[in-house]
Image: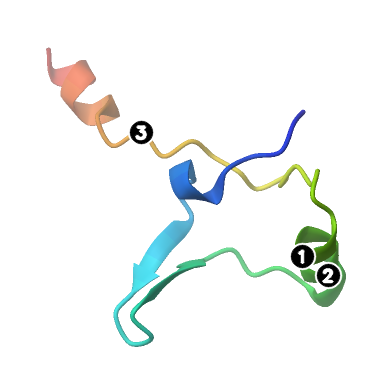
Amino acid sequence: MGKTSCDTCVYYEYDEEYEEYSCSVDLDEDEMAHFMMDTHYACPYYKFGDEYVIVRKQM
């Protein structure tokens, strides 16, 4: 598995309080350090956020 893009992840959400995007998965300290330091890190929680999946089911 290659590096995943947070931009397309379903857990990458906009936080209105901080006015920025952030990951809503609760990573522990080791996972966060691994994620921040490794450029080839493949997130085990990555899930493609396809917002059109419901529309396709209705067709």
* Coordinates of residue 8 in the picture (x, y in percent): 46, 42
> Which type of secondary structure does the marked residue at label 3 adopt?
loop
Amino acid marked by disc 1: Met
Q: State the residue at coordinates (59%, 63%).
A: 25
Residue 35 in the image, given as x and y percentages of width and height: 77, 60
Q: Residue furthest bottom?
A: 17
Q: In which image quadrant can residue 30 be found?
A: bottom right
Q: Which residue is mark 2?
A: 33
Amino acid type indicated by mark 2:
Ala
Q: Position of residue 54 (x, y in %)?
A: 23, 29
Q: Which residue is mark 1?
A: 36
Please name whichever residue, 31 or 57, is drawn nearer the observer in this view of the structure: 31
Q: Are marks 3 and 2 in contact (CB under 8 Å)?
A: no
> From the viewer's perspective, is 20 left or right of 37?
left
Q: CA distance from mark 3 to mark 1?
A: 25 Å
Q: With respect to residue 2, does 40 lie above or below? A: below
For label 3, count other residues whose C-alpha is less than 10 Å away and answer few (under 14), some (14-19) or many (20+): few
Q: Amino acid at mark 3?
A: Asp
- Disc on the earlier residue, 3 or 1: 1
Q: Residues within 10 Å of mark 1 (few under 14, many from 20)?
A: few
Residue at the spot of label 3: 50
Q: Residues within 10 Å of mark 2 (few under 14, many from 20)?
A: few
Question: Mark 2 touching mark 1, by CB under 8 A?
Answer: yes
Residue 9, image x, y percentages: 49, 45
Q: In whole angstroms, how far apart are the C-alphas of marks 3 and 2?
A: 28 Å
Location of residue 9 with respect to 55 vertically, above or below: below
Question: Which quadrant of the figure contains the N terminus?
Answer: top right
Q: Which of 26 and 35 lies nearest the eye of the viewer? A: 35
* Residue sitting at x 61%, y 43%: 46
